[in-house]
Image: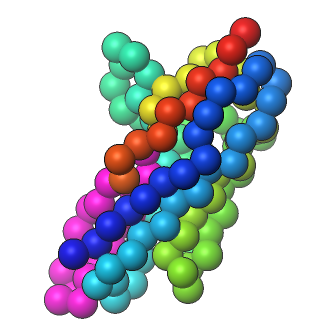
Amino acid sequence: QVQVVESGGGLVQTGGSLRLSCAASGRIFSTNAMGWYRQAPGKQRELVGQIINGGRTDYAESVKGRFTISGDNANNTVYLQMNNLQPEDTGVYYCNAVVRTMTLRVYNYWGQGTQVTVSS
């Protein structure tokens, strides 16, 4: 079994910063990708950013230049540094991990989500 745990959400004013952390643990052989998604009230869950095979990064257009994703592949951990936060960044942020387990099969795991609220 694999667990994905996020931390670091909270309330911040417009223009402020937050750093989210996510750690995957359990029977992990390797981590293919880890990333962050968010879901605002009444909207679909969307990709914010991801890091693939510990190297390549992808970002949503709306966060480019403001958010930075980084990872510690050895510890199956990913971070999301969010700067110049705007009210439209408000939502529940979910960590996603694409993991090859000890059975060598690949599974998709989600964290429980952490709330980010940006006040105007």
Q: Position of residue 94 (x, y in %)?
A: 43, 45
What secondary structure prevails in the magenta region? Answer: strand
Residue at 76% of width from left, 21% of height from top? 13
* Residue 39 image position (x, y, % from top left): 41, 29
* Residue depicted at 72% across the width and 26% down the height: 12
Residue 86 is situated, as x and y percent measured from the top left of the image, at 70, 21
* Residue 57 visible in the displayed image: no
On the picture, is 104 further left or further right than 22? Answer: left
Please state which of residues 91 and 43 is positioned toward the viewer in this rendering: 91
Which stretch did the figure color magenta?
94-110
Judge by depth and name the residue closer to the eye, 79 or 52: 79
Q: Vertically, is 110 above or below 61?
A: below
Seen in the image, is 117 located left or right of residue 14? left
Q: Is residue 49 visible?
A: yes
- Horizontal side, residue 60 vs residue 2: left or right: right
Give the quarter of the image for residue 65: top right
Which quadrant is the C terminus positioned in?
A: top right
Q: Quadrant of residue 10?
A: top right
